[in-house]
Image (cartoon, rainbow, N blue to C red):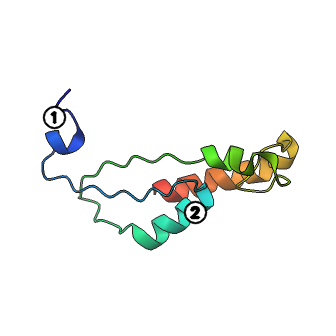
Amino acid sequence: MRGKHLIGVLPNLTATNAAVSGSISLDHERVIDEQIEAFDEDVFGIVVMTTGGNDLIHTYGRRPPVEGAMYGATLEQAQPWIAAFEQRLGKMIN
C-alpha cells in the first residue's frame, strides 16, 4: 500500500487537519466557521469529516444529558438535539 494515499496519488493536494481531540459537533461548527476558508465552485476538493460520536458519549453520564452530551437521554428528550445536529451537519458540509 506504499504510496496509496491521497497525497501520493494527488501530488498537488493541500491537506488541512482541523481535528480537535474530544470535541463535539458544536465545536466543529465553530472551527469550520473560523478556520476553514471557502473555495470557488470550480475548485475540486475532497472533504473527510468525522463528527457526532462524542455528542453521544461525552461526559459518560457524569452530568445530566444536554445537547452535545446526550449520554443517558431518552429518545424524546434527544429529539430536538438530533434535529439540531442534522441542521448543523448540513451547514458544516455546505
Q: Position of residue 86 (x, y in %)?
A: 63, 50
Q: Is residue 22 above or below residue 29?
A: above
Residue ID for mark 2 = 27
Q: Secondary structure at mark 1?
A: loop
The image quadrant where one finds the N terminus is top left
Asked if labels 1 and 2 touch by Cβ distance under 8 angstroms, the answer is no
Please report the residue visible at 45 percent of the width from the left and 56 percent of the height from the top: 19
- In the rendered structure, which amino acid carries the disc numbered 1? Gly
Q: How many marks?
A: 2
**Seen from this angle, which residue lies furthest front?**
62
Tag nearer the camera, 2 or 1:
1
- Between 59 and 41, the one lying in front of the other is 59
Please report the residue visible at 32 percent of the width from the left and 58 percent of the height from the top: 16
Q: Is residue 11 left or right of residue 44?
A: left
Q: Quadrant of residue 23?
A: bottom right
**Few, some or many C-alpha atoms within 10 Å of disc 2 (few <14, some 14-19, many ≥20)?**
some
**Seen from this angle, which residue lies furthest left?**
11
Residue ID for mark 1 = 3
Q: Is residue 20 above or below residue 79?
A: below
As measured in the structure, the alpha-carbon distance from the residue carrying label 2 to the one carrying label 1 is 33 Å
Q: Earlier in the sequence, mark 2 or mark 1?
A: 1
Q: Position of residue 90 (x, y in %)?
A: 54, 53
Q: Secondary structure at mark 2?
A: helix
